[in-house]
Image: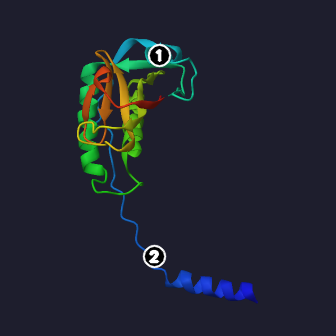
Amino acid sequence: MRYLILLCLLGLTLKATEVQEVPEVPEVSFKSSPIPIYTYPGKTDRDLAKAFELKPWSTKKLMCFDSHYVGVNFKYFIQYTEWFNKFRTEHCPTYGNGDSFDCENFAFLYKSLMVTSVFKKKNLRQILVGVLMVKSEKPFHGIGGDGLHALNIIYTSAGWYVVEPQNGQYTELEKYTNPIIRYIF
């Protein structure tokens, strides 16, 4: 009998709950994204460990899902970052949305959209773009400064760069000052 009453109450609660209409998702075209220009030689997961002074396959600080990567031309990096910033402005939420679309979402979106550009060139190597998980002690280009934060890292013909995907600002890796907790490629 208790279960029957509970089911009835649950049914009443479900009926009383309003169903909200899901907003229409805008159609997005990636045809306007720039075509990658690669820089060689490529890098392996061991090269990355050496570059960041880590032990190879150190999954605590370096996560590599592929074994071979290729960098991009600095000019392409700038073109892509400008394209992404425009894409982000037109298609992504700009209001405080809690944990549903925050720093790591922008960082993984930046990475994902860049690596899908390999389809434009039919490259079999992964672009050397990753996500940095950092301890944000100081704001970087106006974002962060308290707690954990996610950004992007990319290898270009001009060296390593850190990108804040929420505003398109970037700097050389050696000038980035917050402690890096994890590199994800």
Check whether the beta carbons of the residues at disc 2 and disc 1 lie within 8 A of each other.
no
* Residue named by callout 1: 53
What residue is shown at x 67% (from left), y 83% (from top)?
A: 7
What residue is shown at x 38% (from left), y 52% (from top)?
A: 101
Checking the image for residue 131, the label placed there is none
Is 169 or 52 nearer to us in this picture? Answer: 52
| In-image side of 131 versus 83 (left or right) | right
Asked if residue 9 is positioned above or below residue 90 in the image, the reply reads below
Residue that extends furthest to the right in the rendered view of this protein: 1
Identify the amino acid type marked 2: Val
Alpha carbon separation for disc pair 2 and 1 = 53 Å
Asked if residue 168 is positioned above or below residue 59 in the image, the reply reads below
Circle 2 residues within 10 Å: few <14, some 14–19, many ≥20: few
- Under circle 1, the secondary element is loop
Position in image of residue 67 (x %, y %): 54, 20
Residue 93 shows in this picture: yes
- Under circle 2, the secondary element is loop
Is 87 or 179 nearer to us in this picture? Answer: 179
Asked if residue 91 is positioned above or below residue 52 in the image, the reply reads below
**Which is more N-terminal, label 1 or label 2?**
2
Checking the image for residue 19, the label placed there is 2
Determine the image quadrant of residue 143.
top left
Determine the image quadrant of residue 109.
top left
Which color scheme does this rendered protein use?
Answer: rainbow
Quarter holding the N terminus is bottom right
Identify the amino acid type marked 1: Glu
What residue is shown at x 31% (from left), y 57% (from top)?
A: 96
Position in image of residue 140 (x %, y %): 27, 36
Position in image of residue 87 (x %, y %): 27, 43
Position in image of residue 166 (x %, y %): 29, 42
